[in-house]
Image: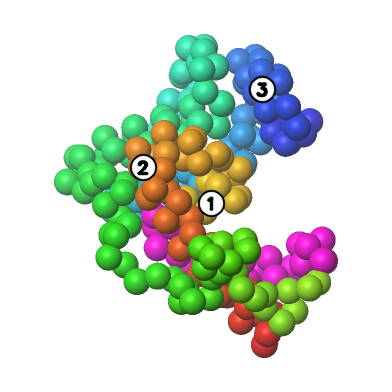
Amino acid sequence: MAEAMLSSPDPAAADAALLERLRAGDEAAFEALVARHHATMLAVAQNYVKGRAVAEEVVQEAWLGVIKGLDRFEGRSSLKTWVLSILVNQAKTRGAREARSVPFSALAPEGEEPAVDPARFRGADESYPGHWRAFPGDWARSAATAVQDRETLRVVMGAIAGLPDAQHTVIRMRDVEGFSSEEVCDALGVSEGNQRVLLHRARSRVRAALEEHFDA
């Protein structure tokens, strides 16, 4: 039931229903919320603190903050954005104590080499500028078939897990959690341009892993 609420086609209605259950002390609803967002929260926290163990502590502190703040949540943002904002504040505070507090955008230096040769994208004077010129050899398989392929999913999730922290965080938020670009920028304090660059680099690396997998 709680999982259905989290995936409702009407996000506002889903938030309202889930919030009501959370405020009523529904443990199943809280467990579903944790299961849905814990991994992304951990990825975000690791951008601000040293080591996974500390990041885990920050995430636990954030969940305590969520529980304590449920009655004060006014719905000005989505529930997931509010939860993530609590996590980011906790992580920044902890990072400052460890002298590791840096702007999120600093984790994506502009001088980094492109993840994929720019020549593989269509030019401004071509149809569909910016899109890939060609697909991997086996890319013609239906999306449904690929999604059902556990090995393909393993390759995708493995590629995401191996990304640099900032890219890992942004692609998890956008493509796994379904955050909008605006929500990502607001939560992480990153510009739209940097968010777009991080997402492009992350998706390019994941695509490269899929190309290798499909063409093997």
In the image, which residues are magenta? 142-167
Q: Identify which amino acid the numbered label 2 is placed on.
A: Ser
Q: Earlier in the sequence, mark 1 or mark 2?
A: 1
| Marking on residue 172 | 1
CA gap, disc 1 to disc 3? Answer: 21 Å
| Predominant SS of the magenta segment | helix
Q: Earlier in the sequence, mark 3 or mark 2?
A: 3
Rendered view: 171 above or below 148: above
Residue 192 pos. (x, y %): 41, 43
Q: Residue at x 52, y 53 (%)?
A: 171
Left/right of residue 149 with respect to residue 90 in the rendered view: right
| Marking on residue 12 | 3
| Marking on residue 191 | 2
Q: Name the residue nearer the viewer: 65 or 151.
A: 151
Q: Would you say residue 58 is visible in this rendering?
A: no
Left/right of residue 17 with respect to residue 174 in the rendered view: right
Which callout, 3 or 2, points to the residue nearer the camera?
2
The quarter of the rendered structure image containing the N terminus is: top right
Q: Residue at x 23, y 46 (%)?
A: 102
